[in-house]
Image (cartoon, helix red, strand yellow):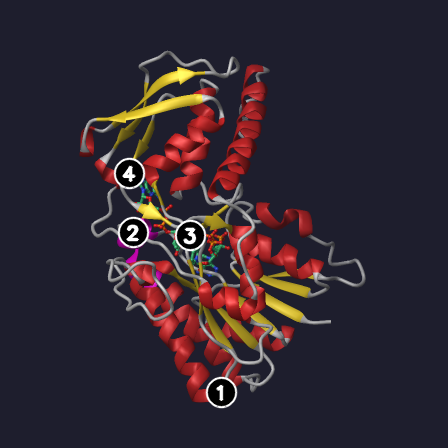
Amino acid sequence: MKIALITGITGQDGAYLAELLLSKGYEVHGIKRRASSFNTDRVDHLYQDPHETNIKFKLHYGDLSDSMNLTRIIQEVQPDEIYNLGAMSHVKVSFDTPEYTANIDGLGTLRILEAVRLLGLTQKTRIYQASTSELYGKVQEVPQTEKTPFYPRSPYGVAKLYAYWITVNYREAYNMYACNGILFNHESPIRGETFVTRKITRAASRIALGMQDTLFLGNLDARRDWGHAKDYVEAMWLMLQQEEPDDYVIATGVTTSVRDFVIKAFDRIGITLSFTGIMENEEGTVVECSNPEFQLPEGKVVVKVDPNYHRPTEVDLLIGDASKCREKLGWAPNYSLDEIITEMMAADIKLFQKEKYLKEGGHDTLNYHE
Ligand code: NDP
Ligand code: GDR
């Protein structure tokens, strides 16, 4: 039985990867952060009581800023595979917390690599590093491949650039099996609520249910290559099952603007939007509602631009060429963007229908001070 250790197990990808590895018979260990409230929602369904025998899923308290903690966990777990998914992963927030982002996303990766080296596990433990299409940043060429030059455009991208190269360096210097997956954006119903896709599907659902008036967004012109997180964790695993370590682009090869994502999301629930105006004055207006369940007045403005969501430097266009991964790993995405949006909208409509029902029944808050 193989043993895997996942940093960032409480995040979107960590949860899907843990499910995948458990289904393949792995013993899965994960690092969770101590927080003042529960932060394990995404993996609670995998939890096993530690008093049970034959435990296959175990969480350890830790943090990517704490090298002694990481070294101890790796020593205890003796993993065959480490998936380093932990990160301050929000690009806009990285402009507010650049030093923290460099510490966790950049040096955190070094701490993992160095722990494996110091513990003498270089020939046992394989490492996956969560690299990103944000490395490409300012457009140099499209579609982007493993050979496209990097030009990151945020503290997040720059921190991940360090992580990318330190992974390559440890592979070459110490003959370690360490891979970079250069993953383009990937989404799902459990995507973090402040990333643009989930922000849109949540807001579209709430607006349709009469629980919110307006969705405020930043740059509607940005274009992203969006895939499904379930497909992408499969590629992470495949990268660690090869004879030789290597770096791979994971993408769908299709790019879509934020504006078109909004239109598609509302369209899923029978609301047709049209966008008019330019730049900061652009607005999304209801043209037609064909679903009797969700009736919004024609002409109602439901999307507005708020310049506060603009980034000091933006990544305008991402579209990936995953040919290498297709040829060498036999990987291809199963989900189209339309299917992803359908799944996300269905999940958020259900979530907010439940919330609305509870609120209407007077069960909207849990007041701990009563
Ligand atoms: P999420 O933001 O959903 O999850 C990030 C995870 O990292 C969470 O478990 C979080 O813990 C944990 N984390 C944050 N800070 C620390 C820290 N200081 N020490 C230990 N753990 C920490 O990200 P995703 O699942 O979407 O992404 C996974 C990885 O892949 C990230 O590294 C991201 O940068 C990268 N990536 C993501 C892409 C995407 O489109 N999703 C594309 C390319 C790369 P907590 O739950 O407590 O906050
Ligand atoms: P990104 O994802 O920055 O690509 O990073 P995000 O969903 O945050 O933004 C995508 C694009 O949408 C534009 N945008 C907005 N974004 C957010 N979050 N909120 C808004 O209101 C909004 N309006 C417009 C952004 O400007 C941007 O162009 C994600 C993360 O998962 C990273 O960790 C990962 O490395 C990359 O994807 C690949």
Circle 4 — which element? loop
Q: Which is more foreground, mark 4 or mark 2?
A: 2
Residue at label 1?
175
Quadrant location of the N terminus in the rendered image? bottom right
Magenta segment includes 101: yes
Q: Which residues are magenta?
A: 91-102
Residue at label 2?
317
Ligand 1 under 8 Å from disc 3 Cβ: yes
Location of residue 341 in the rendering, given as x and y in whole percent from the top left corner:
49, 37
Residue at label 4?
220
Location of residue 23 in the rendering, given as x and y in whole percent from the top left corner:
70, 58
N-terminal-most mark, 3 or 4: 3
Circle 2 — which element? loop
In this view, the residue in front, 148 or 233, is: 148
Residue at label 3?
185
Circle 1 — which element? loop
Query: How crowded is the residue under tag 1: few (<14 C-alpha within 10 Å), some, or many (20+)?
Result: few
Q: Is residue 168 above or below residue 298?
A: below
Ligand 2 under 8 Å from disc 4 Cβ: yes
